[in-house]
């Protein structure tokens, strides 16, 4: 049987490839500079070089800090290569063969034999787009960590396919055929599930429409318990870059212990504010109703957390985090603004009244994040 090659669309390939290339380029630059600093510190007394190098970037570390500096640089490079490999495989070139799937990218290839396939979960997004999770005994690097976020379940192995890939239907058809052959028509239903998208996927695919639908539903769609889980996830998202930074720099992750608790404080404060704001409009909200509505607007903070994690791995300069926080705060503020517009049937600029607490409190959270970021 002739193999079928699934080509990636050119714009998406360039974006994904650019991400992992930049990740490695930034980290390699810092790695080389670290070695140059150390070498300058070793050689300046031997070669009679000036103790202070002419270029500030080459200032050598102290003699006591040389080992820890080099160790940190090597751990950072290892994490960068590991992360870049996972990103590259996220847009791998897929070749369908009669006995399995061959995933190829710049970092090599991964063979997924048909007998490793165990199940399929399909989620339909707006505009007839699909995200599919393939349960398999062999998967792609780090993609099992996406399963709890995007599919609401833990997965030890597997990989994700999206309808953005060309010939997506052919890939899914191949997997379905092999699963039917493996389990039979009757038992196949136990291994194939069609699910509704969770709220994070809905916000990623159609953020404004999702927030509008949530706001217009009375009583609120979420129970207080569900909202608590949502806000806990939002607050915990910032642990990811802090933990990775602590690993690279071999430090106690104090920030990962402190920042999530501080971030949780945004929930009651923003809810009190929105409930108080509602007194001036036709729709009156209680504090509990506002508590049940607000967390969903902040779920995209996981995207921010992933972006910050990539910057940590790349060795992003400390002061340059500040301009990054502007769009990070802007995403949460924009969705809160849309919630305010839908709740009270007002338009911009009147709706900006609803985002004051969000902007101010998130600025404080990211300020504490930066202060506690290991470096």
Image (cartoon, rainbow, N blue to C red):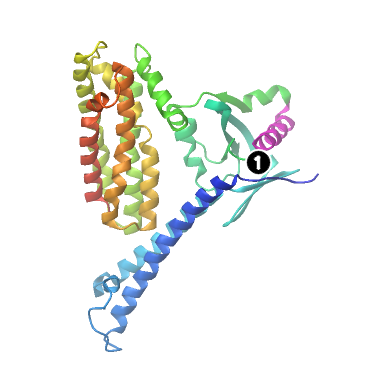
Q: Quadrant of residue 298?
A: top left
Please report the residue visible at 49 percent of the width from the left and 53 percent of the height from the top.
Answer: 18
Instruction: Say which of 225 and 336 sits in front.
Output: 336
Query: Can residue 125 be seen here?
Result: no
Query: Can residue 371 be seen here?
Result: yes
Please report the residue visible at 26 percent of the width from the left and 55 percent of the height from the top.
Answer: 319
Q: Quadrant of residue 9?
A: top right
Mark 1 Cα within 10 Å, few/some/many (few <14, many 20+)? some
The image position of residue 48, as x and y in percent, is: 27, 89
Please report the residue visible at 36 percent of the width from the left and 43 percent of the height from the top.
Answer: 305
> In the displayed structure, does residue 178 sit left or right of residue 40?
right
Q: Which residues are magenta?
A: 167-184
The image position of residue 373, as x and y in percent, is: 27, 51
Asked if residue 194 lies in the magenta stretch, the reply is no
> In the displayed structure, does residue 128 sit left or right of residue 366?
right
Instruction: Say which of 357 and 252 sits in front.
Output: 357
Instruction: Say which of 147 and 182 sits in front.
Output: 147
> In the displayed structure, does residue 116 sit left or right of residue 55?
right
Residue picked out by circle 1: 116
């Amino acid at each position: 049987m002739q193999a079928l090659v699934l080509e990636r669309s050119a714009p998406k390939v360039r974006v994904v490839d650019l991400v992992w290339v930049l990740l490695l380029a930034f980290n390699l630059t810092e790695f080389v500079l670290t070695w140059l600093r150390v070498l300058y510190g070793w050689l300046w007394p031997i070669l009679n070089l000036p103790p202070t190098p002419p270029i500030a970037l080459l200032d050598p570390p102290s003699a006591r800090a040389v080992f820890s500096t080099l160790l940190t640089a090597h751990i950072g490079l290892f994490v960068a290569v590991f992360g870049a490999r996972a990103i590259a495989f996220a847009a791998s070139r897929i070749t369908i063969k009669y006995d399995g799937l061959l995933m190829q990218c710049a970092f090599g290839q991964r063979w997924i034999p048909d007998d490793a396939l165990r199940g399929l979960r399909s989620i339909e997004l707006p505009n007839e787009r699909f995200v599919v999770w393939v349960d398999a005994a062999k998967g792609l690097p780090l993609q099992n960590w996406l399963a709890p976020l995007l599919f609401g379940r833990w997965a030890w192995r597997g990989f994700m396919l999206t309808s953005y890939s060309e010939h997506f239907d052919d890939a899914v058809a191949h997997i379905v055929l092999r699963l039917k052959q493996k389990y039979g028509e009757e038992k196949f239903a136990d291994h194939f599930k069609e699910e509704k998208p969770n709220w994070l996927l809905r916000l990623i695919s159609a953020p404004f429409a999702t927030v509008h639908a949530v706001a217009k539903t009375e009583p609120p769609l979420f129970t207080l318990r569900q909202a608590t889980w949502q806000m806990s996830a939002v607050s915990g998202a910032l642990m990811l870059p802090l933990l990775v930074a602590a690993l690279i720099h071999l430090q106690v992750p104090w920030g990962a212990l402190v920042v999530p608790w501080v971030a949780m404080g945004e929930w009651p404060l923003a809810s009190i504010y929105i409930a108080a704001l509602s007194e001036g409009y036709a729709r009156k909200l209680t504090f509990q109703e506002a508590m049940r509505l607000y967390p969903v607007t902040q779920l995209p903070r996981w995207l921010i957390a992933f972006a910050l994690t990539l910057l940590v791995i790349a060795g992003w300069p400390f002061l340059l985090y500040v301009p990054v926080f502007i769009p990070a705060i802007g995403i949460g503020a924009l969705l809160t603004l849309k919630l305010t517009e839908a709740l009270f049937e007002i338009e911009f600029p009147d709706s900006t009244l609803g985002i004051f607490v969000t902007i101010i409190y998130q600025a404080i959270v990211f300020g504490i994040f930066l202060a506690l970021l290991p470096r």
